[in-house]
Amino acid sequence: MAFQLWQLCFIALSISWLELCIHRAIFAPLSKLPGPWYSLFTDLYLMYKEFSGQRREYIHELHKTYGPAVRLGPNEVSFTSLEALKEIYQSGGSGYDKTEFYTLFKQFGTRTMFSTLDKGNHSQKKRHIASQYANTNIMHPEVLGGIQDRANAFIRICEKSKGTGMDAYIYLHCFALDCASHHLFHPYGTKSIEGADLNMMEELSYHDSLMRNLAQYRWPTMSFWLEKVFKPRPAPLANDYVLASSRTSDSGEHSLTYKLQNSKDAFQPIQIAAECMDHMAAGIDTTGDALCLLMYQLSLSESFQVQDQLITELSINKDKAFDDLPYLDAVIKEGLRCFPPIPMSQPRYAPTGGRTIDGYFIPGHTIVSCQAWSVHQLNEDVFIKGDQFLPERWLDPKAALEMNRLFFSFGAGGRGCTGRHLAIAEMKCLLREVYIRYKTRVAPEMRGRMNLSDQVISSRPLDQTCKLIFEPLN
């Protein structure tokens, strides 16, 4: 019986596909790694989980099933061990460049420090930026005073609530925006807590972020159609504000704008604006969400003992600097462990020639990563009862030493979060001002779901509302 041409083509393609599957199942380097069988042949299911906001949980469940090393797709592997974290991100991480995934985070069409892929160019940018985020600069009275002023503004909102439910999600994100913009543009920071720039906060925080960019990254040949399905993240107020503020010539010397404008290597105005927009957007989402999730946890009845202990420490140490308050530090550290600002994968390419990670040979250009959500919960020999909120775990110096080695809330190594000292200072300052005055509990009318909703790289409370009652202390 004669075959038609299309039938012959179909048979040939089927045989080729079958040969590829057999080769990958038997000979492909990643075939030795544990993981679901289909991950040898396709990453379509992983993409489905990405676009349905379930990537983090999907990978977490895979690690619970298969262990600390899991094959996610034909060219992608996830790890949770300390050995892997050090190899990929820290001293062993030479040559593990960022993947094209980070191109999603360009601002104004310009690569920022965060979205720069190779380490050489990243290091060059970091030299001009890191000093403004060093702890010595953050603790300068001009910088710390700006944070304190914005914490005081938050307290004024609490006073106005008069014991009724207040949406902490809104004002914690306002606080984060105002602190970030102060650090970037002082004295031209936003005043969203007072209401002047509230629309800008909503513009940055409430819209779906970067999903269109992710779709174009995954399917670049379909850009025309994807533009019709995924709408861009609109931020005209923020764009105009950053473009204007980054061009001012009288910013404070501790601001990032001042540093970049006076750098020996001339930064173009659009480069300064891009860096500032990147830092502002990151600051509002990460710090705002971390504070919101932590305060919600403290306001649950199951955490009242933790809240009471925090209130006690603050009340008997009113004159101490917030860096001298060990229980406050433990509460924040545990909050960041349980609710990391970036809980999802931070992908890198394995170097040319390949590397051995966790006993598995990983070929060059394979995508490798760790995600904080799993690192912090599945290393049970270090994080005992890792799925529980237990600040006391950080009070044991010996245990804290081991936990800090696996602490991945701000990333790790030379490409970890540059703004971590600023974020910690903001959190400590705000929580001290709140819990030296108030006891908090969840408002009876609170109906918002606080489980994490995954975005492209970060997560946020699902319904973006968190009504709390602030009860004045006697």
Image (tube, rainbow, N blue to C red):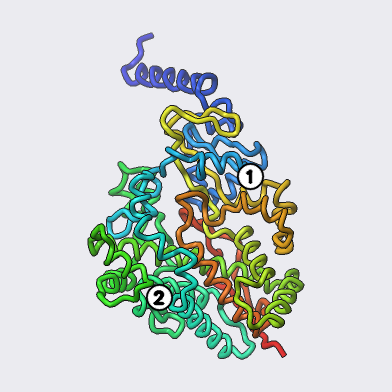
Depth order, front residue of 103/418: 418
Q: Pointer 2 and pointer 1: residues touching (CB < 8 Å)?
A: no
Crowdedness near tag 2: few (<14), some (14–19) or many (≥20) residues, C-alpha within 10 Å: many
Q: At 74% across and 76% down in the image, what residue appears? A: 308
Residue 53 place in picture, x, y as percent: 51, 53
Q: Where is mark 1, residue-wise? A: 61
Give me the C-alpha separation between circle 2 and circle 1: 40 Å
Q: Residue at x 31, y 49 (%)?
A: 225
User: How many numbered tags mark residues here?
Assistant: 2
Left or right placement of residue 106 versus residue 19 in this view: left
Query: In the rendering, at what x and y percent does residue 411 appear?
Result: 52, 52
Residue drawn at x 58%, y 30% as measured from the top left: 37
x and y, in percent, of residue 251 in the image: 31, 75
Identify the residue shown where x is 57% and y is 52%: 408
Three-letter residue code for mark 2:
His
Q: Amino acid at mark 1?
A: Glu
Badge 1: residue crowd in 10 Å (few <14, some 14–19, many ≥20): few
Labels 2 and 1: the sequence-earlier one: 1
Q: Quadrant of the C terminus?
A: bottom right
Give SS at disc 1. helix
SS at badge 2: helix
Q: Could you tell whether 211 is left or right of 336 in the image?
A: left
